[in-house]
Structures are given as structure tokens and as C-alpha cells.
Amino acid sequence: MPPVELTLDAAPSATGLRADGLARVALAKVVCTGVATVASLAYLHAVNPNLPGHYPLCPTYALTGWYCPGCGSLRALHDLTTGDLASAWSMNPLAVLVVPYLVWAWIAWLRRVVTGRPRQFLAPAWVPMTIGVAMVLFAVLRNVPAFAFLAPH
Amino acid sequence: MTASWDPNQQPGQPYPSQPVAQPPNNYLVWAILSTVLCCLPLGVVSIVFSTQVNSKWAMGDVAGAQDASKKAKQFALWALIVGVVVEIVVVIFYGALIMASLHAAS
């Protein structure tokens, strides 16, 4: 084999080794995030936030008496782990809507890491804009008496 | 900028004026989570920068999108820090209130 080909061979294997280590770290991050989420949900399933005394109060609610967009999300997630979609929805509809997006985002992250293919596209800008506007509207409206159905109950 | 616009540039030409890069992360997941769970005002700023990542990338402003990506990440992180600090303060405050009331009762 001519020496030129040897040097050509050496370069990709060296970068390939480094890429391999990075890929392993990236995969570990994805897996750890997934495991931590499942473990948290298992704890949330076992320790019911509908009963007082287990979890600290939401700081926004404690300080201002207003419901923040996250108020009721712990109870909603607990209700989802028991399969009670109706109760989860009445606690925090936003949390119920966000869960599928989070699951999809995690799967997309896992797929990027496993296949090594970078992000291919970004959603049109109105998608994150709509999400942002919806969250601010939700935060305001659930404190308005006429929209009390958005508040945790 | 008029300089970046070349009317002779055809779409799909092999050498575009901007270097080809992968879309930056818009950190929308972290922006949403920090808005819901940590600190609404800073989280909303993070979502605004998330939106800018998508809009600037769509316009071909690679540097602007990367800058917005960095800011979306920073504001989500600050929202997280503020949220955690406020939560700790509230827990300590309520803990002290409960201890004080227990002390007064005994």
C-alpha cells in the first residue's frame, strides 16, 4: 500500500474516534434525560400532589395569589400518570397540550443523536410565536373570573 | 442590507452567499419549561428569541439566527436560576412562618 493512502486512512479514523466519544456523551445526555423524566413521573405517580404537604407551593401563587401558567401542572401530570385525562385537563390544559410536544422533541433529539444527522429544518416562525402568545394569554386569562375554567380546579 | 442581496443569484445555485450551516437550536423546549415552571417574564423573552431563531433562519440570516439561539438559551437559563432562587426563598419564608406559629402555639 502506498504511504499516501496510509495517511488518508489515518485521518478519518482519528476524527472518527473523537466523533464516537462525542456521540456517546450526546447519547448519554438523551438517555439520562429520559430516565430522569420517567423516574420523576414514577415519584409523582406514587406521591399524590392533590394531597397537601408533599410538594412546596408555587412561588408565584404564594407571593402574588395569581395562578401562573404552571400552576396545577404537577397535579395534571399526576392525573396523566393515572390515565385520568379529564382531571388533568381541568387542572392545567396547557400542561396536557405541552406533554406531546415534549415527548416529540425528546424523540427528535434521540433520532438526531442516534443517526448523527443534524437538525434538518426549523418550523416556520409563527409556530413558536403562537406558542408564546398562547402561554401569555393562558397566564392572564386563568386569573380572570370569566375564564375560571382555565384555573386549576 | 442591500449588499447581501444579489439579484443574479439563482435559488439552488451551488455557492450561495451565506455559508451552508445546520439550523441552530431554538431552545423552544427550555423556553417553554422555564416560562411555565420558573419565571414567566424571563421565559417569555426566551420564547421571543426562540421565535427569532426560526424567523431569521427562514430569511437566510444565519448569524442572526445563531445569535438569537444563544440569547434564547441564556434567558431560559436565567429564568431557571431566578425561579429556583425564588422557590428557595418562598420555602424558607413559609418554613419560618410555620415554625413561628408552632412556637407561638406551644
Image: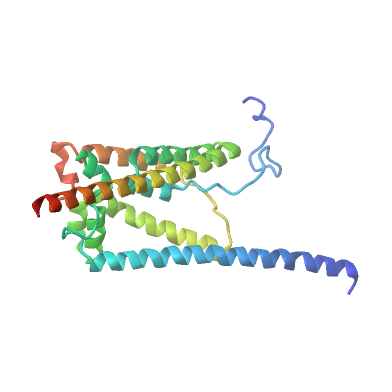
The foreground one among B43 and A60 is: A60
- Res A126 visible: no
Where does residue B96 sit, x and y in percent of width and height?
Answer: 22, 49
The foreground one among B41 and A148 is: B41
- Res A121 visible: yes
Where does residue A120 sit, x and y in percent of width and height?
Answer: 55, 52
Image quadrant where residue B17 sits: top right
The residue drawn where x is 24% and y is 54% is A56
Q: Quadrant of the N terminus of chain A?
A: bottom right
Image quadrant where residue B39 sits: top left
Answer with left or right where residue A151 lies relative to residue B39: left
Residue at the right extreme, as displayed: A2
Where does residue B28 sit, x and y in percent of width and height?
Answer: 43, 47
Where does residue A62 sit, x and y in percent of width and height?
Answer: 22, 44
Vertical relation: A9 (above or below) B85: below
Answer with left or right where residue B67 lies relative to residue B96: right
Vertical relation: A82 (above or below) B45: below
